[in-house]
Each structure stands twice: as C-alpha cells, then as structure tokens.
Amino acid sequence: MPKVELITTAILLVWVAIVITLERIIPYRKGLPFFREGFWTDLVLYTFVQSFALKIIIFDYIIQPLDQHFGFSKLHFVTGWPIWGQVLFFVVTHDFYIYWFHRFQHSSPLFWRTHEAHHSGKQVDWLAGSRSHALEIIINQTIEFAPIILLGADPMVVPIKACIDAVWGIWIHCNIDVRSGRLQYFINGPEMHLWHHADHEEVFYANFSTKFAFWDWIFGTAYRPDHKPLKWGLPYAFPKDYFSQHVFSVARFDEAELAKRSRLFRAYHGIRGRLLTKLTDRVPALKPLHGWPVPEPYTETIPAQRPGGNFGAAPVATAPAETASSPSAALTR
Ligand SMILES: [Zn+2]
Ligand SMILES: [Zn+2]
C-alpha cells in the first residue's frame, strides 16, 4: 500500500475509534445498540464488498477509458497547483454538485429509487452513511473522481479526497449530541444531517448539504430546530437485505411476504441471522452481536409543524397516547 494510503487509512481508523467512543459517552439518541439493525449489511456488504467492487468499475472501467480516449489529463489543468489547493478545489466543487444532485434525488421519483436505501435505516449512526445504492455511488463517485484524474491532479489527491469523504460521512451521520453553534452555518454535522434522516414531513425537502452546511442556508433548505426527531427512516416498508434493497429499487415487493412464499428466498434471506445464532449459541458472550430492538413509538410520518411547512400530503401520525403526551420521553430513546 502506498504511504499516503497507509496514512489515510490510519486517520480513518483513529477517527472511527473517536466517534464510536463519543457515541457511547454523549449519544444524540440514547439506547442505540452498537450492533444495530443492518450493522452487518452496512459494514460487510456496503462498506467493504460494494466499495471494493465499485472502485474497480469506476476507476478501471469508466474513468481510465475516458482518459485514454480524450487524453484530458495530458492538459495538466491543475497540475501546477499546490496539493492543498487541488484538494480544496475538488472538495468545494464536488460538494456543490452533490448538494444539487441530492436535492434532485429527493424531488425526482425515478432518482429517489437510487437514494431511498440511504434513508432506510431507522437507527442512524457512524456507519449509516455507507448505505448507498450502487448506482448512486457510481454516478456520484464518477463525477467526483473523473475531474481529479482528467484535470491532471496529483495522484495523492484521490486518497486524500476519499479520506475526507469518509471522515465527513462518518461525522454527519454519527449518533453524537453535537452543539456546534454558529459553526453549523458553515460545517455540516449531525445536528442537521440526522434531521435529514428523520421521518418528519417537514424535512422531506431540507438539509441536503453533505460537507458544507452553507449550501442549505444559501439555497433556503436549512432546517435546524432546537428539538430532536421522533421518528426515523422511511415512511414505508423497505427490505433489510443488500440484494433485496437493490431489487426493490427496480421492482417493489414485500420482503417478509416473499420470505413466507418462497423457500429459496427464505433460505437465502435468513442466512445471516442463522449464522449469527449458530455463533452466539456456541459463545453466549457474543450475544451483543445481534443487537437489540429499539422501541419505535410512532408508526406514521410525523406531520409538519412549522408554519407553511407542509410539503405535499403525508399520512397523519398516529402516536400511542402516552408517548404522544410526553414527546420528551420518546426523544431520549
Ligand atoms: Zn437524502
Ligand atoms: Zn445521510
């Protein structure tokens, strides 16, 4: 592994250690298990397998042929710039693009299919940002890394930019109770992005920023209330399995129904659970690997409460009487 990649990997590992420690000490939502629902899917399939496979597709089968065909990198557009200047240029320009593409995904029914997986987790933490549809990654990372290579950037810019992406992605999704004050006008963090993952009608079209929060403030999509969300994830059932999540983006189906009807699907679908059960039966100390259920007091999307904030029709919330009367109790879950 080249030296710069060793350093960026080390930075990432240290960052993960810091964030998961802070998630335990000052959690945004109390009681979320470390091995939460979808943990293994996000870690093994999205973070390792998908990233590895798509990296080959994006760099070797899209960007390299493009460069060979057009020879842009020979133009050396940014080659003479200092490395920090190159990194800053690509971080800001890509972040501007991603704000608009993200906003477009939320308003286009077709492109929403490439983004809904990212919103499907009901327990959002440091790892939740990794859950992105393969096509979403191919589009966004091609548009991210092609200019870096085609404009003749230093080879170190790719791993540095990838490290910044990972560090910031972990940060905006982490379950840490951050109060960043005025910094939240500039640097995006969990304070606003965790709201983006809430199943509240008033944030369906808000908080699209990834790294720099100022895009939301400039373009009028910032939402930063002083309370926390009551409900998370999507307002409809979504498959829990990696491959089902991708099939679901093309053809809608009910994962639980299919598991009931098809023996083949049932065998495949339950494989992770069975493996974990086998393991934890033998070594009971490993039981936390299963995680544990977190109460979901609300079953419907929380309707918009800010004046004029009703974006389209959403189902009316039907909260259990006791939790509805004490929202603060639900906040601390
Ligand atoms: Zn989104
Ligand atoms: Zn997110």
Image: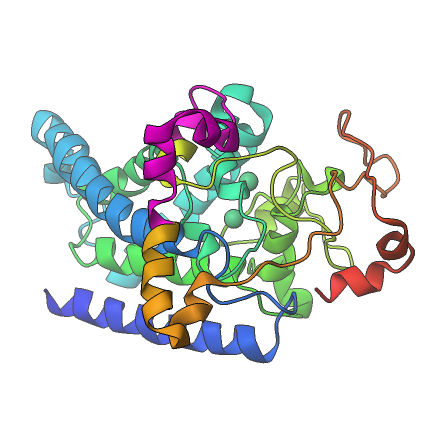
Determine the image quadrant of residue 17: bottom left
Q: Residue at x 74, y 59 (%)?
A: 228
Report the side of 295 relative to 269 (left or right): right
Is residue 272 visible to the viewer in this orientation of the structure?
A: yes
Above or below residue 273? Residue 183 is below
Above or below residue 30? Residue 56 is above
Q: Quadrant of ligand 1?
A: top right
Give how far across and how far down residue 180 sits, in percent. 64, 69
Specify the segment rendered in magenta: 246-272
Q: Residue at x 36, y 59 (%)?
A: 276
Q: Which quadrant, please, contains the C terminus?
A: bottom right
The majority secondary structure of the magenta stretch comes to helix
119 and 158: which one is in front? 119
Q: Residue at x 52, y 58 (%)?
A: 172
Determine the image quadrant of residue 59: top left
Give how far across and how far down residue 221 sits, in percent. 67, 41
Is residue 265 magenta-colored? yes
Give how far across and how far down residue 66 sits, in percent. 15, 29
Is residue 225 magenta-colored? no
Give how far across and how far down residue 40 sits, in percent. 38, 55
Q: Which quadrant, please, contains the N terminus?
A: bottom left
Above or below residue 70? Residue 178 is below
Report the side of 92 relative to 177 (left or right): left
